Structure formats: structure tokens, C-alpha cells
Image (tube, rainbow, N blue to C red):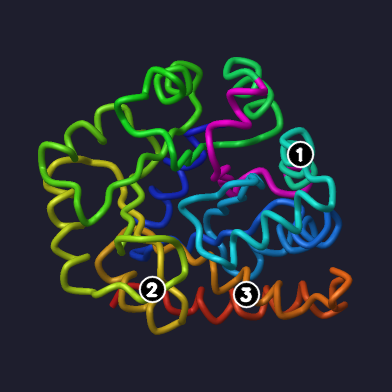
Amino acid sequence: MSVKRIEQKFADLKKQGRSALVTFTTAGDPDYETALNILNGLPAAGADIIELGMPFSDPMADGPAIQEASIRALSGGMTVIKTLQMVQDFRAQDQTTPIILMGYYNPIYIYGVDKFLADALATGVDGLIIVDLPPEEDVELAIPAKAVGMGCIHLATPTSDEARLDQILKNATGFLYYVSIAGITGTREPDLGPVKAAVDMIKNRADLPVAVGFGIKTPENVRAFAKIADAVVVGSAIVNIITDNIDQEGLANPELGSRVHDFVKTLSLRVGKI
């Protein structure tokens, strides 16, 4: 399915008159089985699209919560191969929910771009968000991904002017991810007014759906931003629940999965547009 699964999801949601809820978790956090259990339950809890973080040792765009999640996952032996296996395991019971891998270019470069794209497509990945590849480097990944039908979601920020947006949008596929604050993930809440102006500007220049993320933590945040964007992304708030439900030895509380899913359910109730 690749990028077509993303496009179909947004088309279906548009018919329903609502925005997408996009959830983020880190593959292998706090361990493979717990992470897979969380992943498998997200669609039933209300996640329309899933971002799955590829653990990396230097996640420079991420705040403390997601940095710690990466460290936990790597300490538990998580790898790119195991991340792809997790997607494949998920696909055994879900063929409709889009999965986006979010991470950094170094692990893909080491893996080999062509091999990574082939293996990711084979396991059921639909798109990539690689935060340290600007549009000037589209030849490294975005263009090869586009050629094989893999979605390559680009990032725009509060400092992206119209000329920069044109460059960002050139090879973007799937949707555009608008970073609602200047800075790292999960550190402060975005201001609705400037974000709405930015989303309106983007929509005047492109037909791609626009997702808003970074700093969206509460059902109230979700409700507000769902009114102005095609999707809202919640990451650090979910990862914080994981952090709060593991002990000093890194073992998961038996209630961890259900607590994540219950939180996602509260978010999903707020994505309907009015």
C-alpha cells in the first residue's frame, strides 16, 4: 500500500468531516513485547495514523521524554531490523492503519537507503519522517522514496517563509508536518493563532493534508488544533505515560498498555470538527 494507505486514510476522514489523530510511540520502549502490545491496541483506541519512532542515540529534535524512550529501547537491544519486524508483526492484524517511521538519517544510511526502502515497504511501512534531512538533501532519501511509492513527510516550522515552503513541498508526499513551536518536542504548548495562520498559508500553496505536532499534550489541545488542521500529533504525552509506568529496573507495570490506550481514547473523542 505504501503512501496510498496514507492518502486513503485522509480521504476517508475527510468524508467523515474530521481530522486525524496521529499518535507517537518509540519502537521497543520499554521492551519489545510491551511496545508491540501498545502498538497493536492504538487503532482500537482511536489512533488514525501511527508514528513509530526508530530509536537513535542522538535524537536532537526530541525533548527529554522521547530521548529517554530511545535510550530505554536501545538499551533493550532495539535495532532497525527489530523496528521493521515490529511493523510486520502489527500488519499481521491490521492492514489499514498507516504507519510512519519517524527518526534520523544515520541508521538508514548505515542500513543502505535502497535496502531500507525495500525492506520497509515489504514489512508494511507507509511513510517516513526523517527530521535531520532538510529539503536540500532530498536526493538522499525523499526522491528515492517517492520513486518506489514510500511516503516522505516533510517538516515545516514557524520560521518557514513562503519561498522555503515551496522548497519543502517540492518532494513532500503523504502529508506535511507543521512543527508548531520553535524547539524540541514536548517542551511547551503552541499558540493557536500563529499556527492557524501558518496552516492557512500552507494550504494556499499545496493540496497535501497538514498535520500539526510538537507540544500538543491534552484533549483540549487536540480539540483546538483539530479545528484548523487535517491531523494532530500527540507524542511526548503518550511517552510520559510509559515513563511513569515502568519501575527503576525498566520493567513495565501490567497496566501500562491499558493506560496508554485509555489516554488515546480521551484524545480521539476530541478530533471531530464542529
Q: Where's residue 139, x and y in %?
A: 39, 17
Q: Earlier along the polypeptide chain: callout 3 or callout 2?
A: 3
Give the vertical position of 6 relative to 229 (above or below): above
Q: Residues within 10 Å of mark 2 (few under 14, many from 20)?
A: some
Boundaries of the magenta span = 91-111
Residue denoted by label 1: 79
Nearer-the-camera pick, 105 or 145: 105
Image height check: is 245 above or below 153?
below
Image quadrant where residue 256 sits: bottom right
Q: Position of residue 51 (x, y in %)?
A: 56, 52
Judging depth in this view, the residue of 80 and 200 nearest the camera is 80
- Disc 3: CA contacts within 10 A as few (<14), some (14-19) or many (>=20): some
Q: Nearer the viewer, residue 81 or 51?
A: 81
Going by the image, does 86 lie left or right of 254?
left
Is the residue under label 3 in contact with that under label 1 (CB below 8 Å)?
A: no
Q: Which mark is residue 272?
A: 2
